[in-house]
Image (cartoon, helix red, strand yellow):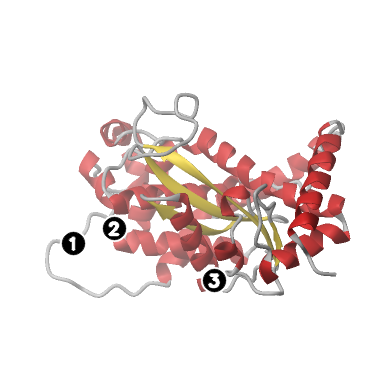
Amino acid sequence: MKITRHIAHQMLEVLDDLREDMKGRKPENYPYAEWEKRREKVKERLGRLPEYVEKAASMITIAKTAGNPKEGTLVQRTMLFLFARLMDKSNRDMEDVMWLFGPMFGMDVSYKTVERLYSDPDVRLVLHNLFVLLLMDEDVSGDLAGDGTGYTLTVSRHYRSDPKKRGKAYRYSFRLIDIMTGMYVGVGYSAKSEMQAFHRAIEMAGSMGIAIDSIRLDKYFSSRKVLKLFGEKTAVYLIPKKNISNIGLLWSRVIRRMLDSPLKYLCEYFKRNLSEGGHSSDKRRFGWIIRQRKDDRQEMAMFSTALFHNLFFIRMNLR
């Protein structure tokens, strides 16, 4: 059967009706006992963080360069960066905090010391290795969802006052999340657009050998250019825009999947809510403001948020 524009529009009407029916369904009872068990796994992961950092640092060979040596060892600098980022305070405030916690890191810390960590290429490499090591300890499924979000650069701008999250006052992040584990497997950053951040997240997942068996994206990514990024073996769950006219081969594959089982398709598509929930949780726990002013330091701050997500997140796999 040839997929025509008329069939596509009819299918969208069916999905709209099913969406309304699904809104009235009662949520399942939350399994608090299972949550407590998984919380213990998070504690174990955090307890092993120094071990993870040591291993991540040992994977790097640093060539000697001219100039003064950096303050502290690579492991010390990385642990200091993670601590400072988790505190989510300004560098001046962190300088005061370190008068109390400084002995834990075995080095003298000023506000400039903290700021320079955001541009330290060696620390950046350790964090990347740490990201990979955490994923290696999980059974990543390859069934992914993705969503982008904006981070404000000023306290005065927020979602409630500027829900579109556009303009020079924002930086964009896109994160690919694994449906089964709740772990981020690809992270992208952009000072220009959410679409650019999306492409960088896809590239990162590919560079780590993450197979994308299926992916769920919102309507912002409903285009043939996005569909071309994925092969025939990848099940793409997208809702076409209402004014879709030129179907073509790529959209035909998607719409045929809808025709096979509209309810199943919609249920799969709504799993992308896990990605939206991840962004919301990350901002509440790790901050919604990017305090750094240089582009590379802003990217470092946003990458560390994704790293913290993989350290702390608990996925219950509710159906």
Query: Which numbered tag is attached to residue 120?
Result: 2
Q: Is residue 249 above or below residue 14?
A: below
Against 170, is 63 above or below?
Answer: below
**Secondary structure beneath label 1:** loop
Q: Secondary structure at mark 2?
A: loop
CA distance for labels 2 and 1: 13 Å
Q: Earlier in the sequence, mark 2 or mark 1?
A: 1
What percent of the width, then of the height, locates residue 7? 80, 57
In the image: residue 158, left or right of residue 77: right
Residue designated by label 1: 69
Left or right of 234: which side holds 60? left
Q: Amino acid at mark 1?
A: Pro
Kind of residue indicated by mark 3: Gly
Q: Residue at x 85, y 70 (%)?
A: 1
- The residue type indicated by label 2 comes to Asp
Tell me, yes or no, whether the two marked residues, 1 and 3, touch with CB atoms within 8 Å.
no
Which of the two discs, 1 and 3, sits closer to the camera? 3
User: Counting other residues with Cα less than 10 Å from the Cα at mark 3, is it few (<14), some (14-19), or many (20 or more)?
Assistant: some
Q: Nearer the viewer, residue 282 or 116?
A: 282
Q: Which residue is painted at 28% across and 45% down in the image?
A: 114
Which residue is at the front of the view, 108 or 138? 138
Q: In the rendered view, would you say 81 is above or below 164?
A: below
Locate residue 38, reporting x and y percent.
Answer: 72, 46
Q: How many marks?
A: 3
Could you say where residue 318 lies in the image, as x and y percent from the top left?
80, 45
